[in-house]
């Protein structure tokens, strides 16, 4: 069953986040991840959630998503992302 990483970021260092994206992209692909949404046009229909930059990545399974997040290639990049942006990340299984 597919799993999705949903990311809401507020970027405070565009150069550092660009560095993060260049390095993180190949790690996502290595674990079967596929970028579905990258800060496209959006409209709040209900509620008050107003994400700054919204990203959705699909992985083949929750286990593969966790394998990616905890991988030796990706773990060091978490500090780079946190230095460049504040954010929320959630993992959710699909149907």
Image (cartoon, rainbow, N blue to C red):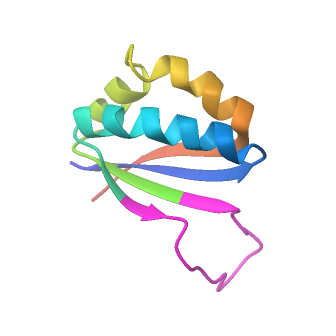
* Residue 94 located within the stretch drawn in magenta: no
Give the image location of residue 35, x and y in percent: 35, 55
Which residue lies most toward the top here? 72
The residues colored magenta run 36-54
Horizontally, residue 64 falls left or right of residue 66, namely left
Give the image location of residue 24, x and y in percent: 43, 35
Give the image location of residue 86, x and y in percent: 74, 42
Taking the spot 73% from the left edge, 30% from the top edge, the residue there is 83
Horizontally, residue 89 falls left or right of residue 32, namely right
Taking the spot 78% from the left edge, 46% from the top edge, the residue there is 12
Residue 13 falls in image quadrant: top right
Q: Quadrant of the C terminus?
A: bottom left
Taking the spot 70% from the left edge, 62% from the top edge, the residue there is 52
Q: Nearer the viewer, residue 16 or 76?
A: 16
Horizontally, residue 80 falls left or right of residue 21, namely right
Give the image location of residue 1, x and y in percent: 21, 48
Taking the spot 21% from the left edge, 44% from the top edge, the residue there is 60
Measured along the vertical axis of the image, is residue 33 above or below residue 63?
Answer: below
Classified by dominant secondary structure, the portion drawn in magenta counts as: loop
| Number of numbered callouts drawn | 0
Q: Nearer the viewer, residue 94 or 88?
A: 88
Horizontally, residue 79 falls left or right of residue 50, namely left
């Amino acid at each position: 069953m597919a799993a999705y990483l949903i990311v809401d970021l507020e970027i405070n260092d565009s150069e550092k986040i660009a560095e993060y994206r260049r390095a993180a992209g190949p790690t996502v692909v290595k674990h079967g991840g596929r970028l579905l949404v990258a800060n496209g046009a959006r409209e709040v229909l209900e509620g008050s959630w107003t994400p700054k930059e919204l990203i959705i990545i699909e992985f083949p399974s929750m286990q593969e998503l966790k394998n990616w997040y905890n991988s030796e290639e990706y773990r060091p990049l978490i500090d780079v992302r946190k230095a460049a942006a504040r954010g929320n990340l959630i993992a959710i299984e699909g149907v």
